[in-house]
Image (cartoon, rainbow, N blue to C red):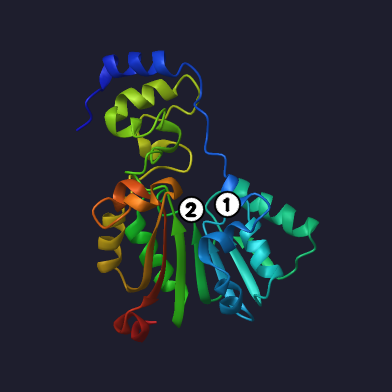
């Protein structure tokens, strides 16, 4: 339960932040491959000659990079036609013929990649089921996402200051947001991209109830807090969650 909500919370937020707060810079990826930073250099060997789905591809830059760096075919999937059109335009500009941007992949994948998405999916359990249906029996899912909900900036735009999204209630934060966004969102889930309040433990439980097994799961600490990062503090001090999932035996048989 948030300590400050309603009109009181809203007025305090307006006083603290009358304009849009400064966003995270993304400086960790400056002049670097974002997907390589998040998933590691071993990604390139894994996708070599393989069919890959970039699930929730956004503008498609990672899908194009994978297509350029060894994948046989990459399908960038997204529900937003605006992002799919942006991906197609970029693919044409880079003359990358082995990438396709669509809402439905026409073939099963050896590898499904998901970047910065699991904290946004409205129904993440259903997404795991969908991914299972898109994967070859011996395939895998590589996912990296964050910040998760208890991260200092886990509220994304709502993180007026560190952990503000935990101190202030949803109603106050959404009312404050009306001054910088005009989409009429009244809940975290209604903002562009959506926010599902994903925590590390919630993700683990979702996978436990899904067709997948966790092969690897790493909670990467906030750099400045790495000495304080442990099993007890990980929800609050983790920058990125990255994992590799494979299908359970029963799911492989069904596939």
Q: Residue at x 36, y 52 (%)?
A: 227
Secondary element at image label 2? loop
Can residue 2 be seen from the camera position used here? yes
Name the spot of residue 39 as percent of width and height, x first.
52, 65
On the image, which quarter does residue 25 sit in?
top right
Q: Say which residue label 2 marks.
A: 116
- Please say if 136 is above or below 163: below
- Between circles 1 and 2, the one closer to the viewer is 2
Name the spot of residue 130 as percent of width and height, x first.
41, 66
| Left or right of 240 on screen, residue 230 | left
Q: Say which residue label 1 marks.
A: 58
Which of the image's four quarters has the N terminus? top left
Name the spot of residue 158 as percent of width and height, x first.
41, 31
The mark tally for this picture is 2
| Left or right of 182 on screen, residue 162 | left
Whether label 1 touches label 2, CB < 8 Å = yes
Q: Earlier in the sequence, mark 1 or mark 2?
A: 1
């Amino acid at each position: 339960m948030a300590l400050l909500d309603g009109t009181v919370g809203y007025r305090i937020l307006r006083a603290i932040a009358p304009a849009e707060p400064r966003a995270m810079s993304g400086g960790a990826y400056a002049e670097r491959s974002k997907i390589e930073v998040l998933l590691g250099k071993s990604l390139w060997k894994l996708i070599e000659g393989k069919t890959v789905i970039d699930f929730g591809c956004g503008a498609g830059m990672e899908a194009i990079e994978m297509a350029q760096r060894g994948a046989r075919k990459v399908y960038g999937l997204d529900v937003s036609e605006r992002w799919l059109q942006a991906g197609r335009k970029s693919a044409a500009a880079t003359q990358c013929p082995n990438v396709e941007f669509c809402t439905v992949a026409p073939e099963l994948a050896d590898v499904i990649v998901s970047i910065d998405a699991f904290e946004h999916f409205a129904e993440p359990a259903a997404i795991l089921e969908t991914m299972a249906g898109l994967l070859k029996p011996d395939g895998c899912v590589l996912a990296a996402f964050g910040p998760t909900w208890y991260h200092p900036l886990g509220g994304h735009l709502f993180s007026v200051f560190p952990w503000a999204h935990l101190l202030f209630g949803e109603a106050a934060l959404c009312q404050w947001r009306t001054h910088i966004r005009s989409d009429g969102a009244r809940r975290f889930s209604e903002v562009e991209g959506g926010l599902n309040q994903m925590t590390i433990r919630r993700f683990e439980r979702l996978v436990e109830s899904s067709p997948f097994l966790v092969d690897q799961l790493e909670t990467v600490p906030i750099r400045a807090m790495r000495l304080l990062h442990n099993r007890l503090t990980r929800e609050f001090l983790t920058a990125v969650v990255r994992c590799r999932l494979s299908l359970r035996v029963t799911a492989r048989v069904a596939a």
